[in-house]
Image (cartoon, helix red, strand yellow):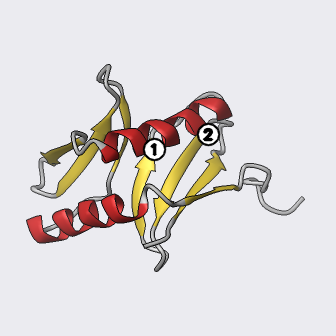
Amino acid sequence: MAGKFELTKTENGHYQFNLIDSDGRLLFTSEAYPHKSGAQDGIVLLRERVAHFICFERKKTSTNKLYYVIREAGGQVIGSSRRYSSIPSLESNISAIRKCVSDAAVVDATEISTSGPS
């Protein structure tokens, strides 16, 4: 299942990445990094953590929505999933990440303007 990492620049000048599956479904959003290299390193870390099957920390919001975060070995959060209403939906997302993360292309969209037309 081919997917892509989309590296973007936020409105405040930070960098983040999204993991998107081959159907265009958002699987994962990283934390914001002050430097592009930090987001690029985050992609490498995510690939490593998922490959070792030790990274999915399942959580629940105060409104009982399910999600997960992925942390680097030192405990820093790399990013999190969107919110789900059922365990099967959450687990389906985790399965999709495991299938596409290793061969997902990296698309650098940081040169695209976030402020709109001039």
Q: Which badge, 2 or 1, comes first in the chain's sequence? A: 2
Q: Secondary structure at mark 2?
A: strand
> Height in image: 66 above or below 95?
above
Percent x, y of residue 80: 33, 47
Q: Horizontal placement of 117 versus 1: left or right? A: right
Left or right side of 14 for 26: left
Question: From what the image shows, is residue 74 above or below residue 107?
Answer: above
Question: Whole-percent x and y of residue 85?
Answer: 15, 67
Closer to us: 117 or 47? 47
Left or right: residue 85 versus residue 107 is left
Residue sitting at x 71%, y 55%? 109
Q: Are marks 2 and 1 in contact (CB under 8 Å)?
A: no
- How crowded is the residue under tag 1: few (<14 C-alpha within 10 Å), some, or many (20+)? many
Amino acid bearing label 2: Tyr
Residue under circle 1?
30
Q: Relative to the observer, which residue lies in front, 61 or 88?
A: 88
Name the amino acid, label 1: Ser
